Structures are given as structure tokens and as C-alpha cells.
Amino acid sequence: MGYRVLFFCFLLLAGFFSCDQIQIEKSSLPPGTGKYGEVLVVVDTTYENRKTGDLLKQIFFKSSVGLPQQEAQFRMATVSPKNFKSILKRSRNILKLSIGKGKKTAINIEENVWAKNQLMLQITAASDEDASRILEKNTQTIRNYFNEKEIQRLQKQYAKKPLKKLASELRSEYGIDMIIPPGFVKMQSNEKGFWLKKEKSIGEHQVIQGISFYSYPYESDSTFSIVELINNRNTFTKEFIEGGRDSSYMAVYEEYKPVSKEVNFNNKYSKEYRGLWNMKNDFMGGPFLHYIFVDEERNRVINLDGFVYAPKFNKREYLRELEALLKTTNLVKVN
């Protein structure tokens, strides 16, 4: 096959990251505290108000890609080392900076130090300049570590009570394994694919999360292009995902070009797209997340998609939930 088979991993940039991952499994540890997407930064106020503090804001407050309103990638709170005690040590995500003359420059990764499912990145540096340089060189890597940990936590939660009957149907009909958490129902399906919906109300406001799958024969690398993504997604959603009004259907929002990047999707080269959708002939819209990769054994292109409709709420965490769900997908081996 002519397409590129590439494998990507998160690189340890600039030689500062060590692989010192300490995993302490203690049944006596309390559960981690905090909400998804929250990071507690332990830093002396002296450095918080210098270049180190500016870099921390750039890391965590950068806007998320593909959302209709600006939302930071993470919610960051800071605390000084002397006040970092008691329940704060149980925070799920911690970035701890130790800055002072004579300290060796390093980053260590530790898990389950004071709580279960806890991730802590520890940075040591001799000065504000050294600390900010480490943060700048490892900006995306730091984000990736915290995001991947959140994804793992969500997947672990989904695996507790999966919808086994629905998962079995998807396995037999489409040759994929996917963990489907409670709340999702099959809306429509045929030999081309399916879409599932989870709907709830918060007060008087509606929230919808949808996931879909469709495939078609692999023919060339052009299948990864943005033009093909839009054409194929619109073809699928026009047939499968209708709006509340007559002749209304979902489509990629034309005025926002989806943003793409190459990713490793469970050891398969994939393109990830993040963009916006709207409902033609109706007043609905929101963000979507889309993965495209090739099933070599069946010579088909796999499309996995998640979308959110939550007009009165922030959408970052709803989309992260779908990211975690989609990433549970694996191909069933051909006998």
C-alpha cells in the first residue's frame, strides 16, 4: 500500500525530561481531588510574577483548538510551597517547581505520591531564567502529559460499566472494539457506519454528545486531506444526522477551516482534525473531533468522529470525554 505508515510518540524535549516515573500503588492512598482539566502549580510567588509565571500561563491558558468560544486548555491554580499541604497534596494534577541557586536542572515525573491516579511533574532549576527556559522548551510536552493522564482516567472510568451488548454489535458488524459508557444509544446504522448519541439536560439546557463511525475502501493518500475529510464527513452526516427541522442536517462549518495534526492512534498513523459543525437549515452547532486512519487488513479507511452540542456551557471537557472514548477503539483482527 502506498500510504505512509508512521508512528509518533511524545518526545522528551531538550534533554530535560527524565523517565523517572515512580508508580506507587498503595491501597491506603485517598482518591485524587479536583475536576478534569485542573492543574495545581506549586511555585514561589517570587517566580510566579517573573518570566516563569508568564510561561506557566502560556502553557495552561493557551486557547483550545476547534472550539466556538475561547477556552483555556487547562484551568490553572497556583499555591506557594509553604501553603502546599493538607488536601492540596491530593490534587489530581500537580506541577511543582523548586527554584534556587545550586539546584540541578531536571524534570521528574511521579505518580500516586499523595493520592490515587495522581500525576505530578517536578521541575528543579537554579534560577528564574533556567526554569522559564525548561518550560518554554517543553511547553507542548507538559500539556501532553496532563492531557494523556486525563484521557487514561476517563477510559478507566468508562471501563467500569461498559455497554457490552452494544459493543458486541459494533464488533460483529464493523470489526472494531470500542468501550461504550452508559448513556449512549444507537440512533442510526447501516453497512456504511453508525452514530450514537448521549443526551442530558442541565437545568433547562440541552447537552448532546455524539460519536460516529464510517469506513470506505482505501484508494490513495488523498483520503487524509482536509478536502476529503469535509466531503466524506458531510456525505455521512447528511444521511445520518438530521436536525429538528425538515431538510436540516449536520455539516462542517464552512467559515472555520478544521485544524489537523498527525498523531499515533493506538499504533496507527492517523490524522486528527478539530473543527466546527453547524446544522443546515437549523440553529445548532458546536465542535467536533475526527480521526482518520487505515485498516490495512481490510483495506479500508476508518473514520471516527465525536461532536458536542452544549450552547450554554463550556465545551472543552465534553470534547475531552469524547476523545477518551474514541481512543478506546481498536481493530478486530481478521481470522
Image (tube, rainbow, N blue to C red):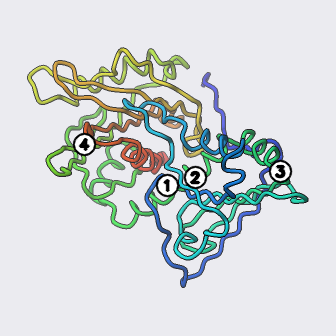
Residue toward you, 143 or 211: 143
Residue type at tag 2: Phe
Residue type at tag 1: Glu
Q: Which residue is mark 2?
A: 146
Structural distance between the alpha carbons of marks 3 and 2: 24 Å
Q: Nearer the viewer, mark 2 or mark 1?
A: 1
Can residue 157 be seen here?
yes
Location of residue 3 (image quadrant): top right
Which residue of the protein is positioned furthest toward the bottom in this rendering? 28
Relative side of 287 to 190, left or right: right
Q: The residue tagged with tag 3: helix, strand or loop?
A: loop
In the image, residue 40 lies at what x, y percent?
A: 56, 58
The disc, 4 or 2, on the residue closer to the chain's N-terminal end is 2
Q: Which residue is mark 4?
A: 208
Crowd class of label 3 (few under 14; some 14 to 19; many from 20; radius 10 Å): some
Query: Where 94 sits versus 293, above or below?
Result: below
Give residue 168's mark.
none
In the image, residue 133 lies at what x, y percent?
A: 78, 41
Q: Nearer the viewer, mark 4 or mark 2?
A: 2
Q: The residue tagged with tag 2: helix, strand or loop?
A: helix
Location of residue 258 (image quadrant): top left
Residue type at tag 4: Ile
Q: The residue tagged with tag 1: helix, strand or loop?
A: strand
Q: Which residue is mark 1?
A: 38
